[in-house]
Image (cartoon, grey):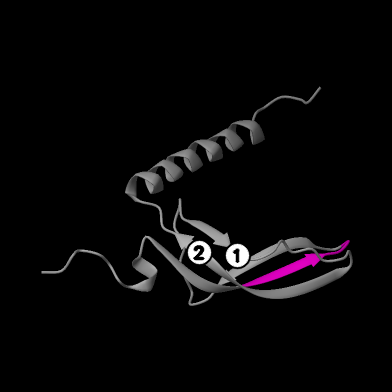
Amino acid sequence: MGSGVTTAKTHARRFDTPCTIQVEQSSEHFHAHVELAGNVELQPGDKVRVHGDPISIPFGHSATFERAATVTRAGPIGRAATRLAAYFDLKELYEVSFNPGRIK
């Protein structure tokens, strides 16, 4: 009999994967995007921690970095709590965005 532990890389509770970080800091764009290798699909509540030193680039530049990242999968309760919190956060935006009346 097996131990019940999942050994597949993308189904484990926590696993490491390579990632690519694209950073741009200019008057047109200010962003940092992380792309995980292997088309890892993230679900609500999952966490990603990118390893390495902090990234700093001069204004007007862009750069790409290769790093390692650790993905921690949320459990069923954490996933449900994240979905529930997101629902109420979205509902709050509806209430603010579509509230009739004037701004004083």
Kindly indicate the quadrant of the structure image that contains residue 99: top right
Which residue is found at the position 40% from the left and 53% from the top?
A: 74
Is residue 28 located in the magenta-colored stretch of the structure?
Answer: no
Return the residue nearer the eye: 94 or 28.
Answer: 28
Position in image of residue 87 (x %, y %): 48, 40
> Label 2: which residue?
70
Using the image, determine if residue 78 lies above or below residue 57: above
Residue 28 located left or right of residue 43: right
Q: Are marks 1 and 2 in contact (CB under 8 Å)?
A: yes
Crowdedness near tag 1: few (<14), some (14–19) or many (≥20) residues, C-alpha within 10 Å: few
Which residue is found at the position 44% from the left and 45% from the top?
A: 83
Position in image of residue 54 (x %, y %): 71, 61
Q: Secondary structure at mark 1?
A: loop
Outermost top residue: 104
Name the chief secondary structure element in magenta: strand
> Label 1: which residue?
51
Crowdedness near tag 2: few (<14), some (14–19) or many (≥20) residues, C-alpha within 10 Å: some
Question: Which range is magenta?
Answer: 20-27
Position in image of residue 68 (x %, y %): 57, 71
Image quadrant holding the C terminus, namely top right
Kindly indicate the quadrant of the structure image that contains residue 19: bottom right
Which residue is found at the position 37% from the left and 60% from the top?
A: 13
Question: What amino acid is labelled 1 in the image?
Answer: His
Kindly indicate the quadrant of the structure image that contains residue 31: bottom right
Mark linked to residue 90: none
